[in-house]
Amino acid sequence: MHRIKSLPSYLLERYQDWKVKTFPENRDWFRKLATEGQNPKAMVIACCDSRVAVTSVFGQRTGELFIHRNIANLVPPFTPDGQHHGTAAAVEFAIKNLKIEHLIIMGHSNCGGVRGCIDMCQGRAPDLEKKESFVGRWLDVLRPGFERVKDITPPEVQQTMLEKEGIQVSLENLMSYPVVAEAVGSRNLTLHGIWADIADMDIESYDGTLRHFVKV
């Protein structure tokens, strides 16, 4: 454990600045969260990408969104094999314990995970194809989406299309979870898919009836 060090100075400085300038204005809100617990109405499954500003986009305060992040904002299919499944656990907790009303898959432009999936499926990323690659095996979830866009050109259009296909794949996989299907069927839960352009933060929402994305 001797290799674990203190926080880097730039983070400590940012924390101290926040604690002095911002926290006092929100002290009552944080105390309310501490004593009463969280009660978010929505869960967002977003990419780990540091450029995806989930709470900022929706103008949410701390405690108002239940957020789960992973590479390329993917939801794998329901696999009750007794293994470790972080995304499935987060979904189950959000529905059963927090009683969320909305579950949102949030994709974005210029996604490195999606780029990696394209490279892997086109044979340009041998490291990702190795059995021991956690990233590669995770991106296998997106292979069905790649099959639907593999003939699209140019590359930048294919990238955007696969980012959106990934959202649809995740929405389809969510419905394979009994806890999700039951909540949706009883009208206690609504599923949503959105794609954000990180350059200007324009958002497109997936229309399940029309089966395509429309600008918000």
Image (cartoon, rainbow, N blue to C red):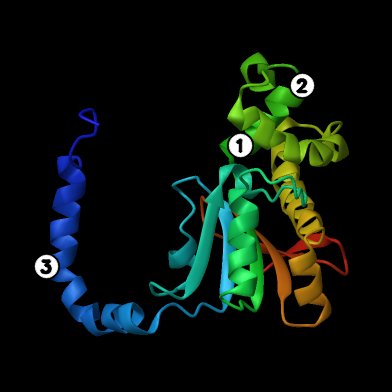
Q: Amino acid at mark 2?
A: Gln
User: Mark 3 and mark 2: span between their CA atoms?
Assistant: 51 Å
Label at residue 20: 3
Residue at x-position 63% and y-position 73%: 96
Q: Residues within 10 Å of mark 3 (few under 14, many from 20)?
A: few
Q: Residues within 10 Å of mark 2 (few under 14, many from 20)?
A: few
Q: Earlier in the sequence, mark 1 or mark 3?
A: 3
The answer to whether the residue labelled 3 contacts the one labelled 2, judged by CB atoms less than 8 Å apart, is no
Q: Residue 110 location in percent, x, y? A: 58, 41
Q: Amino acid at mark 1?
A: Gly
User: Mark 1 and mark 2: span between their CA atoms?
Assistant: 14 Å
Q: Quadrant of the C terminus?
A: bottom right
Label at residue 122: 2
Query: Could you tell me if residue 158 is visible in this image?
Result: no
Q: Secondary structure at mark 1?
A: helix
Q: Quadrant of the N terminus?
A: top left
To which residue does mark 1 refer? 113
The answer to whether the residue labelled 1 contacts the one labelled 3, judged by CB atoms less than 8 Å apart, is no
Q: Secondary structure at mark 3?
A: helix
Residue at x-position 77% and y-position 60%: 177
